[in-house]
Image (tube, rainbow, N blue to C red):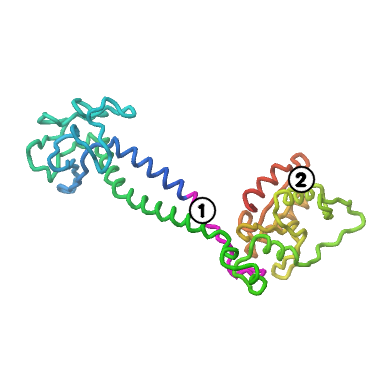
Amino acid sequence: MSTFGEKLPPNNLVDGLLVRKKQLESTILGIEKFLKVAPAGRLRISTNKGTLQYYRVMPAGITSDAGKGKVAGITSDAGKGNDAGIASDAGKGNDAGIASDAGKGNDVGITSDAGKNQINGKYISKKRQSLIKELAQKNYYLKIISYLQDELKLINALIECVKNAGDVNDNIVSPSRKELIETVTLSDIEYVSRWLVLEYKHKVFFEDVPELFTAKGERVRSKSEVIIADTLTRLNVPYRYEFPVALKNVIVHPDFYCLNVRTREEFLWEHFGMMSDVEYSKAAVEKLMLYQSCGIFPGANLLISTETQTKPLSTKQIEQIVKKFLI
């Protein structure tokens, strides 16, 4: 159960589903293009005294590629001159380096079965690895494409279902009843307001520390922290400055404690601004080791920004981190 009275986080499936949808569509398109120009027939593999032998099995009544109208539901190119740079088999002697079977007795190591039973297929010489691999690839694609198409249909249906659901609370709860119940899911605005209202004390500012303030008037300890805080505010990322976190028997105060509103994930953010200083760098490493020993890892639930005297922090660097993890 998530915090702040939310039993069920919002549904964030669509982003991942859209990525998978795009991948499936691209893969299916590639397979369909291959099948349009794939050689007719299928590959049969048998073993003779421990040696693999390959055979090309043609559909019943067809002895060559010429004259075929459809192959596995793909329109044949027969009767055309060229299609995407591939010559038609019809009336030609060669197709991408493969001799036509029509009207021949033997074809580069393939014995013609014209007029014979083709159940066993025509023997393919191992020298013709290109044809063997194309037939094997075709067999695989013909089997896998139906599974990919089924998955794509399911993903499209699920995307539509999730989108139609929208804001569940608004769809099923009238305004007059909303104040009387505890909904299982909070709107983003409700969740953020509850997340930010939590009171806490950050570290004390000593008198000799420069007074630096963010755009919204919050005091911080460095110009770099001003950049980070203002960027978070501009990109609508809620944060708590120097929020106390208990790790083992130690209380640490990460520079920023941030919320990804969309996923409800919380991230600690440490800015190490004096990495040119040996003692400072040593303390930074020790702090990172403490975080890791408590299950807090960079890129998972810990964000890190750094700078040195010669490589100062930039707004672009901060925006990249925010857009990757917090939006």
Q: Is residue 67 magenta?
A: no
The mark that comes first in sequence, 2 or 1, is 1
Q: Which residue is mark 2?
A: 276
Q: Is residue 202 left or right of residue 264?
A: right
Mark 2 Cα-neighbour bin, 10 Å: few <14, some 14–19, many ≥20: few
Q: CA distance from mark 2 to mark 1?
A: 40 Å
Q: Which residue is mark 1?
A: 16
Residue beneath the point at 29% across and 47% down: 140
- Relative to 290, is 55 above or below? above
Q: Is residue 241 left or right of residue 9?
A: right
- Relative to 291, is 320 above or below? above
The kind of residue tagged 1 is Gly
- Relative to 127, is 274 above or below? below
Closer to the eye: label 2 or 1: 1
What kind of element bears circle 1?
A: helix
Residue that extends furthest to the bottom in the rendered view of this protein: 180
Q: Is residue 56 left or right of residue 272?
A: left
Range shown magenta: 1-19
Q: Nearer the viewer, residue 259 or 308?
A: 259
Q: Is residue 13 magenta?
A: yes
User: From the image, which quarter does the N terminus lie in?
Assistant: bottom right
Residue beneath the point at 74% across and 51% down: 233
Residue beneath the point at 81% across and 52% down: 216
Disc 2, disc 1: CB below 8 Å?
Answer: no
Mark 1 Cα-neighbour bin, 10 Å: few <14, some 14–19, many ≥20: few
Q: Is residue 182 left or right of residue 118?
A: right
Q: Position of residue 123 (x, y in %)?
A: 15, 39
